[in-house]
Amino acid sequence: MYVIGISSGLKHGHHDGGAVLMQDGRIIAASEEERFTLAKHARGDLPRGAIRYCLREAGIRIEDVDFVCSPLKSYDNYERRLADYFSYNFGHAPKVTLYDHHMCHAASAYYPSGFDEATVVCVDNSGDSNSGGVFRGKGTTLERVTNFDRHNSLGLYYGMMTQFLGYQMTNDEYKVMGLASYGTPRFEELFDDILAPAQVGFRFNRDLDKRLRDAEIYTTDFSTRQERIFTEQLEEILGPRRLPGAPVDDRIRDIAASAQARLERVMLKLVADAVAETGVRQVCLAGGVALNCKANMEVKRGGSVDRMYVPSVPHDAGVALGAAILKCVEGGHEIAQISHAYWGPEFAPATVHETLERVGANYEECHDEVERCVVDLHEGRTVGWHQGRMEFGPRALGNRSILAHPGLQGMKDKINSTIKYREEYRPFCPSVTAERQNEYFDDTDLLPFMNVTTGVQPGRTDAINSVVHVDQTARIQTVCETVNPLYHRLIDSFAKAGGPAVLLNTSLNINEQPTVNAPLEALHTFFCSGMDVLYLGPFRVRKAA
């Protein structure tokens, strides 16, 4: 049985479209649409490019697909619209099955977790008229325990704070999270009038939602990302907002810290209450709020959790995976544990070589790209690393990455200013081999998806200073030899040559652009940035002879 799961839709405001192809419960291919359209988040797009990729990867036609599955079950006539869409774009429409948005989120986290039972907490902005819920998974069953209505929303709260601080909602929330570590939460008491823990879940102040107050002018689920979504009452509580592009002062940093601290407090109580309700201390997190890796760390450490799983796609691209999984479970198929995110396109050396020749790039073929890359890293060069299958999810996990020596002074500032072209406070992440993770970090669990921060071991900060955030944490990626042997060998060889068993790893892209997919996009990023060298498969590309 072939099943395609999709996310995003034919409605204003939807974002992070993606497609997943499964056969009898096994993933064949998965990708986000932005990697094909080159428009970040692929807003409002159904994932034509991702669907076509999935079919090519499997070597099948759309007529071979038994079901197309999607969220938006509560939307009138959406099943018919999807069928028309597939008929128009592909010449054939498989049977369409719709599921609840947050049930899809829950399925994307629970079934691939490897847990025999789990408490599943989903929190985002909204979907299918809710903003999240608590679920209990046991064996092959997944049941809803609690709903959070769409206006009582943690995702809306954090998006609203993102706007207040002068950034773009549903795009820049991670900037607020990073900025928060530079401030102190001295305003947190004021947040009692914004967001507070409640006896059941949490309570968000609905009077702050401009779209509720002015409902007559907002006729769609979402305003545009340039429109203000909060009422004047938020400025009455916190003082003047920051205009986009204005300087960031101590007050703004402290409001960011207070907003993050309040989110963490609410998430801690929410998960604790959910675990008390289900009696299960194995926890899965999903929904866009589960991209907040600092809150995830606090939840993991909070005393209610024995084991925790957050998928590589907790945001809306992940509902494509969840929808496909739900149909496969209905069909009686077992879902294997998912321990990696490498489900996207891969490019053969011949294809890469053809691209290099076509653009007239200055390149050489390496007999051992790992050995040559280790030299580049130890000599202080910044390295583009484009290898194997592209990652499914927002994190670069060693196949579409920019890499650097994590212990060189000034490396973080160099990459932020000359390659990524982004704010100076933004941190970078470490990739570390599983065998030596405990030498550098205080969390010994495997964390393959770079979605949980952890503390740095005493005495190790100087050796990896460019990947240690100002609060002495790091959002790590555990690299296992069995999962990504090439990337593991690179880190291990770097360590054997005198470096730490850690590499600085950030996505192969320029700020506000999607992580690259194809070799041509990698070359564009390379030549439009201050990156020193680029490895495309076995080829090393330079900018000058």
Image (tube, helix red, strand yellow):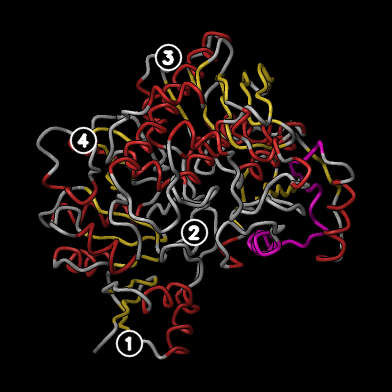
Circle 3 sits on which residue?
Answer: 304
Amino acid under disc 1? Asn
Quadrant for the C terminus in the image: bottom left
Q: Is residue 74 above or below residue 388?
A: above
Distance CA(mark 1)–CA(mark 4): 40 Å
Amino acid under disc 3? Ser
Of tags 4 and 2, which is closer to the observer? Answer: 4
Amino acid under disc 4? Val
Q: Earlier in the sequence, mark 4 or mark 3?
A: 3
Q: Tag on residue 362?
A: 1
Circle 4 sits on which residue?
Answer: 456
Q: For residue 54, which quarter of the picture?
A: bottom right
For image coordinates 70% across by 35% down, the residue present is: 212
The residue segment tinted magenta is 48-74
Circles 1 and 2 in contact, beta carbons < 8 Å: no
The picture places residue 331, in percent across and down from the top left corner, at: 77, 34
Of tags 3 and 1, which is closer to the observer? Answer: 3
Left or right: 85 as drawn, with respect to 136: right
Distance CA(mark 3)–CA(mark 2): 35 Å
For image coordinates 70% across by 42% down, the residue present is: 324
